[in-house]
Amino acid sequence: MFQDDGYRKARLATLIAFLINGFSVGNFVSRIPDFKSELGISNGVLGASLFCASIGVLSALRPASRSAAKYGSGPVTKYAAFTLALAVPLVGLLFNLPWFLFSLFAYGVLSSTHDLSMNAHAAALEDKAGKRVMSTFHAMWSIGGLTGGAFGGLLATTNISIRIHALIIGLFIFVIAIITRNWFLAASADQHIFEKHEKRKTPSRFLILGLLGLCGALGEGAASDWGGVLARDGYHATVFMSALPYVFFSFTMVIGRLSGDFLAHKFGVVKLLTWSGLIAGFGLGLGLLAGNIDGVIIGWFLLGIGLSTIIPMMISATGKLANEKYSGQVSAAEGVALVTGVAYFGFVIGPPLIGFLSDLITLRWAMLLPAILAIVFGVSAKKVLS
């Protein structure tokens, strides 16, 4: 066991890591309508551009998981924070469309590396704590997304350029990375020694968990990227009002995740996730059917409540399986990488798919897709998890 002070410092560092990762994403999402208007591109082109970030995310999953397993999730999380600080200003330069595509890919790679390693570190801390705490870590990510979205929306209303905005965020993350660099657990906490020419087959159980998380991730990704665009282009909302769907979505994600560990303990994971899917699906669907900005805000509000616990519960279950049932066969970092890799495909395909569909049937009706998938998830959760 680790000394209490060492564990507490590592837990605080990991909470902060989730916070700054979410903060960077929140700021990025808040300026998506401005990316579109400044580059003069359509919803379809914007969706294809966002797909470059998604490709970067997927490209990083395997090498990042191997690195976290080989060198320990703590050291990888520490160094990944510095690269994240570099990635944000790259996107903000926004020279032209080709640069935008390249910078989004780079951001996807570096943000994903930081995301995966901090999740693996959270799984290691949860194992040491001997209790469910993953949802609290993800609540910090949502708090970061909430504050980042609000901060970004505020800067947008004051006409701060995207370049200056991105530089401010990059410097902030860099300072945080300097402060917390020595707080993480040592590499030995979850280091996995690979034998030369080692061949291992990952249990199918992890794939099933990933598929379950994919339904929620698709809705989360689509809600994050398209709420502001729907509000501004579909209902002619102001710049500030356009930021509100994501802000309300992030707020309810925070509330749900802060309550997630308690609710899972009280009602069980199956019942919690069943109701989560139904609330997310029907809430978003009814909000879209309302056909006004108030409906969008309410829909995103209920979607956040429903989706809040899905990814944390999947990652928590993965870490527990890897550490208890498959110890020595699959490291927690690799298990988390597989589950998040499959689930994050929802983040990958969600935004561009909604973009392409919106050119065919309008953005409002395209957003019914994540609502339907959330309902499908809700009614199938018991069968998959039981």
Image: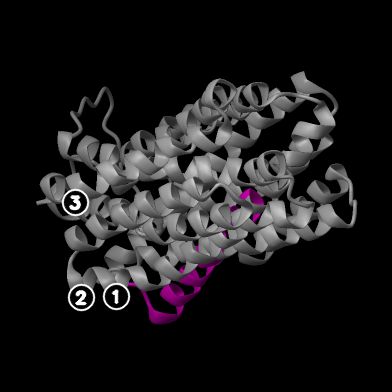
Image check: 190 left or right of 30? Answer: left
Magenta highlight on residue 14? yes
Q: Which residue is mark 1?
A: 262
Tag on residue 321? 3
Above/below status of 46 relative to 376:
above
Q: Which residues fall within the magenta stretch?
A: 1-25
User: Identity of the amino acid at label 3?
Assistant: Leu
Q: Secondary structure at mark 3?
A: helix
Q: Secondary structure at mark 2?
A: helix
- C-alpha gap between disc 3 and disc 2: 21 Å
Q: Nearer the viewer, mark 3 or mark 2?
A: 2
Q: Nearer the viewer, mark 3 or mark 1?
A: 1
Image check: 157 left or right of 300? Answer: right
User: Identity of the amino acid at label 1?
Assistant: Phe
Residue at horizontal 70%, vertical 49%?
30
Q: Secondary structure at mark 1?
A: helix
- C-alpha gap between disc 2 and disc 1: 6 Å
**Residue 129 seen anywhere in this rendered image of the structure:** no
Q: Earlier in the sequence, mark 3 or mark 1?
A: 1
- C-alpha gap between disc 3 and disc 1: 20 Å
Tag on residue 184? none
Colour style of the rendered protein structure: one colour
Say which quarter of the image contains residue 201.
top left
Q: Position of residue 148 (x, y in %)?
A: 67, 58
Q: Position of residue 291 (x, y in %)?
A: 56, 47
Residue at the far bottom in the pictured view: 4
Residue at horizontal 31%, vertical 58%?
276
Q: Position of residue 252 (x, y in %)?
A: 48, 65
Residue at horizontal 61%, vertical 22%?
48
